């Protein structure tokens, strides 16, 4: 379909890196990438490129870059049918989660991809990732995108962005979405799992949010965590939100000093969101006394959220909602398919 137009936004990451004189991987120029994937010109749709300057290793990702990214999408939304974002794998799940919240009423695909080995290497996984991501971004049926949501394509699978976590530092199969099935799979054919794909709201225009509140922390519990550490974290100046990584089904310490610290924070209007440290499964604070004590003092359930989605959802809500009760209401529902309740 030559009248379809896809925009590739290159942010950096291993996919486009080369080895510098010290033997380290550093980002390189975008023209280099196009030379390495000549197949792009064989698509029956148009592909244009936009490159970040400077390019970044995604370990340097920040909310200000997310704001820049959604700004690019907003500016180009009417000219393109889909977007492919080339991104480092290290924080790709955070960016995909953040973008899903910052782009409301999305009806076009935003597919993030990258690679574990640079495109310039013989055994690169990047080429297939980019080619399939482009095909998914351009897939339409009856004038509607097949995947009108923010997703991550990696190693033959397409995941909902805000359900995904980087899982493996070494293998090509770097991402997992343990609490939600893949929304599409690439075999001989690209198979779309329609029942798992968001339907997109075609009645309202795209709404782009350009504020995220970074006065937030992830506090991971561990046996031996002490009062001094918890106290100083919860009393950090301007702190507004805590993603509390608890044990199992949402259990924490039932010790009085810990509950008192948390309660004082909640009384100061700090939102505390409970996610599990387990790789799979959900928070249910009713199961154990060590969970119900958290519920009693006002800790909010993160259900089956990834830490990445919980963190970025909280950043998004804290920046865009004034009323604490509205924030709590939004945390207790799925706003972009990020949790199952
Ligand atoms: N450090 C790189 C990045 O996230 C890793 C990668 O792209 O795989 O930018």
Image: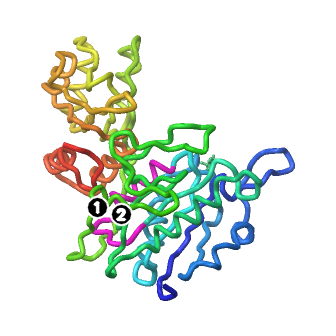
Q: Is residue 99 magenta?
A: yes
Residue 333 percent across, percent down from the top left:
18, 48
Q: Residue at x 17, y 21 (%)?
A: 287
Residue 166 disc label: none
- Looking at the image, residue 280 sits to the left or right of residue 122; the answer is left
Above/below status of 163 relative to 31: above
Counting every numbered tag in the picture gives 2
Which scheme is used to colour this image of the protein? rainbow
Q: Residue at x 22, y 26 (%)?
A: 264
Q: Is residue 259 magenta?
A: no
- Residue with the mark numbered 2: 149
Residue 188 percent across, percent down from the top left:
52, 61
Residue 91 percent across, percent down from the top left:
52, 47
Quarter of the image for residue 289 reads top left
Above/below status of 206 relative to 67: below
User: Which structural element holds mark 2?
Assistant: loop
- Residue with the mark numbered 1: 198
How packed is label 2: few (under 14 Cα within 10 Å), some, or many (20 or more)? Answer: many
Quarter of the image for residue 35 reads bottom right
The CA distance from mark 2 to mark 1 is: 7 Å
Q: Residue at x 51, y 67 (%)?
A: 84
Q: Residue at x 33, y 57 (%)?
A: 101
Question: Which quadrant would the C terminus be assigned to in this image?
Answer: top left
Q: Main secondary structure of the magenta part?
A: helix
Closer-to-camera residue (114/122): 122
Query: Which residue in the rendered view is the most extreme toward the bottom?
Result: 3
- Looking at the image, residue 40 sits to the left or right of residue 334; the answer is right
Quarter of the image for residue 236 reads top left
Closer-to-camera residue (232/11): 11
Span of residues in magenta: 92-109
The answer to the question of whether label 2 and label 1 lie on touching residues, with beta carbons closer than 8 A, is: yes
């Amino acid at each position: 379909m030559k009248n379809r137009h896809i925009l590739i936004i290159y942010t950096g990451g291993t996919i486009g890196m080369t080895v510098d004189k010290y033997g380290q991987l550093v980002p390189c120029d975008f023209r280099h990438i196009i030379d390495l994937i000549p197949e792009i010109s064989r698509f029956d749709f148009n592909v244009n490129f936009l490159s970040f300057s400077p390019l970044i290793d995604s370990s340097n990702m920040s909310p200000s870059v997310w704001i820049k990214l959604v700004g690019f999408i907003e500016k180009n939304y009417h000219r393109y049918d889909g977007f492919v974002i080339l991104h480092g794998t290290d924080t790709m799940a955070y960016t995909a989660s953040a973008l899903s919240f910052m782009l409301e009423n999305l009806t076009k695909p935003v597919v993030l991809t990258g690679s574990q080995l640079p495109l310039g290497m013989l055994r690169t996984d990047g080429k297939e990732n980019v080619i399939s991501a482009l095909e998914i971004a351009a897939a339409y049926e009856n004038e509607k995108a097949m995947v009108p949501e923010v997703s991550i394509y990696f190693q033959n699978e397409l995941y909902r962005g805000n359900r995904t976590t980087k899982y493996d530092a070494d293998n090509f199969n770097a991402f997992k979405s343990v609490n939600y099935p893949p929304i599409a799979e690439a075999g001989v054919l690209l198979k779309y799992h329609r029942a798992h794909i968001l339907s997109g709201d075609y009645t309202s225009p795209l709404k782009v949010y350009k504020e995220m509140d970074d006065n937030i922390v992830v506090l991971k519990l561990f046996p031996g965590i002490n009062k001094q550490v918890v106290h100083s974290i919860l009393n950090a100046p301007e702190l507004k939100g805590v993603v509390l990584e608890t044990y199992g089904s949402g259990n924490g310490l039932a010790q009085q000093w810990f509950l008192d610290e948390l309660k004082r924070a909640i009384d100061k209007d700090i939102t505390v969101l409970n996610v599990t440290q387990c790789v799979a499964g959900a928070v249910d604070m009713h199961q154990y006394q060590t969970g119900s004590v958290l519920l009693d003092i006002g800790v909010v359930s993160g259900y089956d959220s990834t830490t990445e989605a919980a963190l970025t959802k909280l950043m998004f809500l804290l920046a865009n909602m004034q009323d604490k009760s509205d924030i709590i209401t939004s945390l207790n529902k799925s706003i972009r398919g990020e949790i199952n309740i």
